Image (tube, coloured by chain):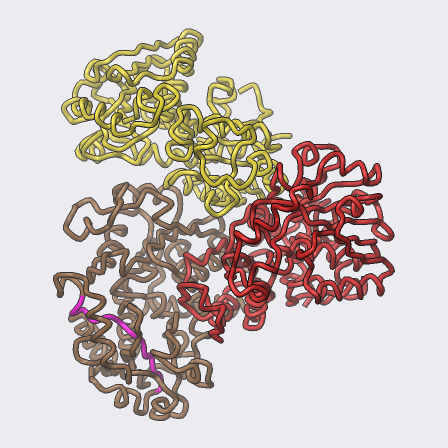
Chain colours: A brown, B red, C yellow
């Protein structure tokens, strides 16, 4: 750890934090986890407020952020746009018009909340950003542009950095070290419409810590170009590797970690497609129902290989019950680490040394 | 008081707590009430979180639990299934299909929340459990099965143990002692569709403390068989009595306490009836509009007799304004005791000695 | 400051607080602002609960009250009638029938909440009070009648005293003194339907502190008669002046402060009109699109003149972006002062000396 000044920083992608800053966050997360286990008080954010703006439903994120703030001595507001004057962006571009019932300028919302509390956290994707790929992230950045306090990304359509950090914590706990370990980040079938953020963030973080990352998906489910570029650069800089293939079995072979999860192909949503075509996206996905994480596929991994999923899990489609509830599954430890990872980020950005 | 180890226990029915354990809860409730009155701090649950899952509306329960957690130094999350990934049960039985939009497995919801906080509290009945009698309770028990932390029943379709304990506190405060006092637990007319949980819980608790319990209702409004059986056993074990009659006046005669309240007949809901027939239930109820608590009826009670209701009260149908706002009514003291009773339960199950 | 006993007082209009009491509130607000800036703890309401009943959406009010309670060591419940048993009034007057789905008597709601916490705060106007002018305020007063704890008006259809106090704080900070300063409180065009409460409260408070108040609006947008009467009496008692004109430019001329904002004419809502006619109201408003606060109009003010708005701002209609984001605009300082003003009121009414 060399850098300690993190107060006031945004947490939008992990890529914008240096490796040493991420290590600082990880160290703090483990320390907070130990204190939680032992019941040692850690009211580092006494009287402080985190505004949680949920444009989408949430179980893990809302409850881990809100309970986390309580444990840190502060409080989180659960905010839904329907109970406020729904914020819209100022520039009135085409996609904004798709966001109905805009009742207040987002720039005003962000500046006002900055006066009352200490962090603005935002979740926005899918319907809430009109399924325009990248629009959710743009809105998070718009909040960050106007806010005078840190902005935390609680999952947009491109990234889920909190999940990424929790995943990294979990892998390190289970495997001991990260360097040279093989992680398979693969597409899996679901009949629900899910976003790619979790997978982008997993790939971006694993390549920062010297892991051998294999991304696997059917043709048409490519990562964003800039994410692929970052992953390759990360691998080169930090001594791991990064490859993309179209074979789930091959990805699982000798893997230490598998992270199979569904996401919608960009071919069916704007800006790549003219319109939102979720029917078409589902039809395309249904061609790959064999991309399912089964006990049989898991046999291809190392004996010590672990299964991870951010949840909610589409049991029966993405994965069998046998796997989720089996001995290799670490999904509940992974879910718990959301709490500790986020408490670390919150403590650093709103309570860290000035 | 002989038993003090209550940490980690579920609070689903009072019947699952021993009489001595209930006495411990009562003693603590009175102590917390005194501290509240005197403004003496009692932060026994500092930094702890109670997840409140409300499938149904609430005034008293939500606000007494949430304010109670604040007073105890912790925090309660007000959770509505519409803002999370709606939990459904794993077994996919017929009644579950009636719960629309299941988006996450209840077993996952319960296990994840267990990692972030300290208690899961649930309210579920009526529409939320598809009016299948007993289904609400089954879902509460499903949470308890999967959760690693205590589960509190904030009212299901069979029981309302928090209300029961508050009622017992109130009766003891007003009458001085419980043994040998007559309590009339009677059906009353309403054009609203209400559940029976409050009445089951009142009968189950009063028979645990040596009271003479008379249940009165028109034919067709019978308590569940297993509840009747428990009540008779309780009466025998603890020296009171239990009788069931079909005459409101007779029940009121010489009563120390009357608790008249409406509930829907099981004849019109599954599994007894094939379909939900609330129209039919209302038509049946309307035959008994004279089952109303009036000043005149109250004259049949002892001079010191008190009127109780859990609220919301259907003024004009179940009872006259004159009674609710009259000198025998203890409904607001009863409502207040919800706070103290629940704080006692919360303190015991999540903060008690390890 | 001469009077210090404010514990238990309602905060419904500023007119019901004496000038000295308001000065006490202002002094405390400035002190709390300094403590907030310096990070000095001020947990004056430890363990206390403020129930926030929002019949209407809110950004500033909800978040400043909730964050404010956290900063004071207590907690605020965000309550929406849809999650409780919707309260209705007891007297069943005609306008009440317009409030659909009443499920519990307001008198019961108010008395029950009084048992659990320490203040009931209410926001109600527009649809929530059936657009019957004065009905929102009557409902706030109904809560106050039944509650045993203080009631805070978080904006009704007649007043917004919290905004008023924040505005006064802001004016004093910007101008140094209040006496003899000219404030223009003027109607402005919007195609949204807004209420008059903010403007009534600004006029009532500015006339209490010796300011020269000019109210300007097109014919048909008159203040309530009793407010005009109070304003004139205030001006006479406290040495300022009060005039009403129908010329926005004239109001702006040499003003130290301008507060231009839209409100709906009473000619189109009950009881003055038989029915609610918002279409008619919008048509009437559209005749006065030139009542817009522009940079040009602002040139008429003193060089040091400031622009204020309670927000949400109807950018483009009520005012140009150039003005809102320009050097004379104090809208974000004004929004921040909501926090400090409300913390002062809350501390006085629920934590003040007994």
From the top left corner, tell me how far across and down residue A107 is, in percent: 25, 44
| Residue drawn 47% across the image and 23% down it | C13
From the top left corner, tell me how far across and down residue A79 is, in percent: 39, 50
From the top left corner, tell me how far across and down residue A288 is, in percent: 24, 81
Side of B30 relative to A273 (left or right): right
Q: Nearer the viewer, residue B176 or A282?
A: A282
- Asked if C250 appears above or below B103 in the picture, the reply is above
Side of B178 relative to C135 (left or right): right
Quadrant location of the N terminus of chain B?
A: bottom right
| Residue drawn 64% across the image and 30% down it | C354
| Residue drawn 27% across the image and 55% down it | A140
Is residue A179 magenta-colored? Answer: no
Instruction: Give the magenta-colored segment's residue range.
Output: A256-268
Q: Nearer the viewer, residue B14 or A222?
A: B14
Picture quadrant where residue B18 is located:
bottom right
Is residue A267 magenta-colored? Answer: yes
- Asked if B347 appears above or below C173 in the picture, the reply is below
Instruction: Find the residue positioned furthest to the top.
Output: C236
From the top left corner, tell me how far across and down residue C241 is, in percent: 35, 9
Q: Is residue C298 visible?
A: no
Q: Nearer the viewer, residue B167 or C238?
A: B167
Quadrant location of the C terminus of chain B?
A: bottom right
Q: Is residue A345 visible?
A: yes
- Asked if A94 appears above or below A279 in the picture, the reply is above
Q: Nearer the viewer, residue C100 or A268?
A: C100
Picture quadrant where residue C199 is located:
top left
Picture quadrant where residue A334 is located:
bottom left
| Residue drawn 73% across the image and 57% down it | B25
């Amino acid at each position: 750890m060399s850098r300690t000044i993190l107060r006031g920083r945004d947490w939008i992608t992990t890529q914008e934090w240096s490796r040493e800053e991420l290590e600082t966050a990880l160290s703090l997360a483990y320390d907070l986890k130990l204190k939680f286990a032992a019941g040692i008080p850690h009211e580092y954010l006494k009287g402080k407020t985190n505004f949680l703006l949920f444009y989408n439903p949430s179980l893990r994120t809302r409850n881990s952020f809100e309970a986390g703030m309580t444990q840190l001595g502060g409080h989180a507001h659960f905010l839904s746009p329907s109970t406020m004057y729904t914020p819209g962006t100022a520039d009135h571009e085409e996609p904004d018009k798709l966001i109905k019932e805009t009742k207040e300028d987002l720039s005003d919302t962000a500046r006002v909340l900055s006066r009352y509390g200490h962090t603005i956290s935002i979740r926005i994707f899918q319907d809430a950003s009109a399924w325009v790929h990248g629009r959710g992230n743009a809105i998070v950045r718009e909040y960050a542009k106007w806010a005078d306090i840190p902005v935390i990304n609680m999952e947009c359509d491109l990234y889920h950095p909190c999940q990424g950090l929790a995943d990294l914590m979990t892998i390190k706990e289970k495997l001991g070290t990260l360097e040279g370990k093989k992680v398979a980040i693969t597409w899996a079938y679901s009949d629900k419409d899910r976003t790619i953020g979790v997978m982008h963030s997993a790939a971006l973080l694993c390549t920062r810590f010297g892991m051998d990352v294999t991304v696997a998906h059917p043709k048409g489910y490519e990562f964003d170009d800039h994410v692929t570029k970052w992953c390759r650069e990360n691998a080169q800089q930090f001594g791991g590797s990064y490859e993309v293939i179209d074979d789930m079995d091959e990805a699982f072979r000798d893997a230490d970690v598998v992270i199979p999860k569904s996401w919608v192909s960009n071919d069916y949503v704007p800006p790549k497609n003219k319109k939102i075509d979720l029917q078409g996206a589902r039809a395309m996905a249904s061609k790959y129902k064999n991309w399912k994480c089964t006990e049989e596929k898991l046999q291809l991994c190392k004996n010590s290989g672990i299964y991870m999923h951010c949840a909610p899990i589409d049991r029966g489609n993405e994965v069998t019950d046998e796997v989720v509830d089996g001995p290799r599954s670490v999904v509940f430890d992974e879910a718990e680490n959301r709490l500790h990872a986020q408490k670390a980020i919150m403590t650093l950005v709103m309570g860290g040394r000035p």
